[in-house]
Amino acid sequence: MPCTVVVGAQWGDEGKGKITDLLAEQADVVVRYQGGSNAGHTVVVGGETFKLHLIPSGILHDHVLSLMGDGTVIDPQCLAEEYTGLRERGVSCQGLRISGNAHVIMPYHIVLDRLQEESRGKSVIGTTLRGIGPTYTDKAARMPQPVRMWDLLDKDVLRERVTGQLAEKNKIIAALYGADPLDVDAVVDEVWQYVPVFGGHIGDTRAVVFDQMARGANIIFEGAQGTYLDLDYGTYPFVTSSHPVAGAACLGTGVGPTAIDDVIIVNKAYMTRVGAGAFPTEQDNDTGQLIRERGKEYGTTTGRPRRCGWLDGVALRTSAKINGATGLAVTLLDVLNPFEQVAVCTEYRVNGETLTMMPGNLDLLADVEPVWEELPGWQTEISGCRSLSELPAKAQAYVARMSELAGVPLKMVSVGPGREETIMV
Ligand code: GDP
């Protein structure tokens, strides 16, 4: 604090939602800086589970301003449903502010996402089919008159934008993919029905952040997905279409890099990955299956089983560097409770060389051999531990080793999904 970035150090699903929610107790503002409804943060409060795809995790604290920054992309239907669902469960949502500059995921983006994935055949990326890639593509392509959140405030402007967009999109949909074109009125009406739900929350989020910074507020910058899903620093092309890394917190919210005080990287006690691509420490066996079952490693958004494996110290070390980490939060440590031995990859071997950092050319990942270190498992329940010293010595040694591999101090250890099942170091 005061300006802290919370970023996933792996391929996403690290439990960032829980960590952000916890830090939000002390925060004044939580701002999402990238991604769309492909995120899936699960926060458990008082035994109640909240699944958030789009709205920042700070929303569960009434005193917190929850901002969706300029760098996010927003699906109006998803936003309206999430907002309504939260309201029905007694969450006020009063602190929600949505950047007018955020690009809108339109029905044609969702159609194109599906058509593009279908046309990729064996080279399928495994997107969540929520239109996020096509929306960021349009943003980067500087399409004339794309739809941004500001444009939802006036139906005539929205219609003008949709008319312009469909003039091009329908040609692609019909000529390239042989699919049915979309109707302007149908698209406008579909989107317009959701605007009354959240329209009052659209505004200038950058101004809010600047104002709060001037007041010395505690601000959390919340990323979605994780470092290795970053468009530049991830395992391209099996990545997301935005930048989850900490540097993007500035781009997606409008603050300068010198404003950031702390960067907390969130890493599970093991690794997971969704979809295709190399995964050096994968355990496609009983070990992986036990981790999957204990960690409930199935996608929040898609329900897809996640691939599971032992901790990758090379990935962790590199992630700490890429994000400029100042602290490490270890999550899901309790998942490893039953193991007699736990393995950690400390280095890679490839073509006769030893690598301590991820290769610049991540294509090499497919060929690396992990160098393993075995640590004794603790084989006892740890979810009741509330301080490091209460953890079994072997579990303490494990998280200490993680911090050593990352090269950053340990700040938090999560020993269960609940807010209270956390050790603050
Ligand atoms: P996020 O997108 O990074 O927030 O991660 P997800 O929400 O997809 O995945 C984290 C999952 O692990 C959620 O179901 C959390 O409730 C759960 N979780 C978080 N921390 C812990 C923990 O320490 N132990 C256990 N068992 N579950 C946890």
Image: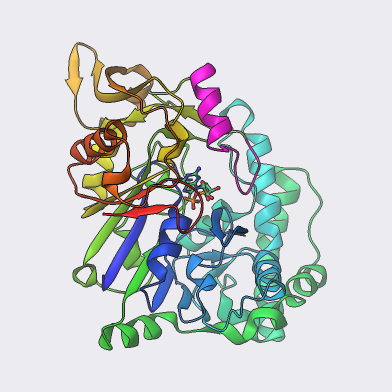
Q: Magenta region: which residues?
A: 286-304
Q: Nearer the viewer, residue 177 or 226?
A: 226
Q: Left or right? Give the position of 367 relative to 404.
A: right
Give the quadrant of residue 157.
bottom right
Q: Is residue 265 left or right of residue 357?
A: right
Residue 339: percent from left, percent from top = 43, 23
Image quadrant where residue 80 sits: bottom right
Q: Position of residue 403 (x, y in %)?
A: 22, 41
Q: Residue at x 18, y 70 (%)?
A: 258
Residue 284 seen in the current view = no
Tell me what residue is drawn at x 23 percent, y 63 percent.
Answer: 262
Q: Is residue 57 visible?
A: yes
For the N terminus, the image quarter is bottom left
Does residue 184 belong to the magenta stretch? no
Give the vertical position of 289 relative to 164 (above or below): above
Image location (x, y in percent) of residue 147: 60, 72
